Amino acid sequence: MTPTDKPPETVGDALARQVEARRSPTYRWVVEALRELGAVDRAVYQAVARTPTAALDGPVRRLSDAADNSRLWLGIAAVIALLGGRRGRRAALEGVVSIGVTSATVNLAMKPILERRRPDRVDADLSRARLVPMPASTSFPSGHAASAFAFAYAVGRHLPGLAVPIRLLAAVVAYSRVHTGVHYPGDVVIGSIAGAGTGAMVAAVCDRLPTAP
């Protein structure tokens, strides 16, 4: 980055710009808070990128790759459906539906609102051992994190014994998107919240549907 270049606009910066456009003193504290959150977001990303983690880089990169196109979650759903009996089949089906609804919500309704650029991995001096292909879509929010937590919500509510491990796995997948340099922390936090929320809404609809005897 040259001295004249501006740092990439964060979600907080973009929201602050929109609020500031109202030109009302009432919103001044909101603008400042959003800009500060944006600065924290960048700082955490830089800290993760520049911390040497040679032992983690390979496994975290492979996990991030495995979650592409929700392959990881679809594989787990298949195993649960085969081995989990009736409850397993319902958990797997609801999990897959939650992924589909969440992906549509994130990609069609959320990403177009704030077209946040992906992080600059060159400027962050990210280790080549971490690199995964940079997605062509915009950065906010993280679709990987959203799908992970939507699936985890569905599985956890039907199979309580898997609730903790599946949520931990979802959290590691979400973190992997920051570790590999394709998302800022704020992207995965909001993506995780959006995914869990969408999963809860899908669950509420499914609970109203009649079940087979």
Image (tube, rainbow, N blue to C red):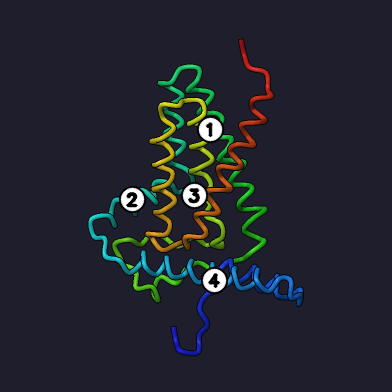
Of labels 3 and 4, earlier in sequence is: 4
Residue 62 disc label: 2
Residue 9 to residue 177: above or below = below
Kindly report the distance in space between the C-alpha atoms of the residues bearing marks 2 and 4. Answer: 33 Å
Kindly report the distance in space between the C-alpha atoms of the residues bearing marks 3 and 2. Answer: 15 Å
Callout 4: helix, strand or loop?
helix
Callout 2: helix, strand or loop?
helix
Residue 150, given in percent of the width and then of the height, sits at 54, 40
Is residue 198 shown left or right of residue 55? right
Residue 86 disc label: none
User: Could you tell me which residue is drawn at 63 percent across and 17 percent down?
Assistant: 211
- According to the picture, the residue beneath numbered tag 1 turns out to be 154
User: Could you tell me which residue is drawn at 70 percent across and 75 percent down?
Assistant: 20
User: Which amino acid does the dot numbered 1 rest on?
Assistant: Ala
Q: Residue furthest bottom?
A: 4
User: Which amino acid does the dot numbered 2 rest on?
Assistant: Arg
Residue 145 disc label: 3
- According to the picture, the residue beneath numbered tag 4 turns out to be 36
User: Which amino acid does the dot numbered 4 rest on?
Assistant: Glu
Is residue 165 shown left or right of residue 113? left
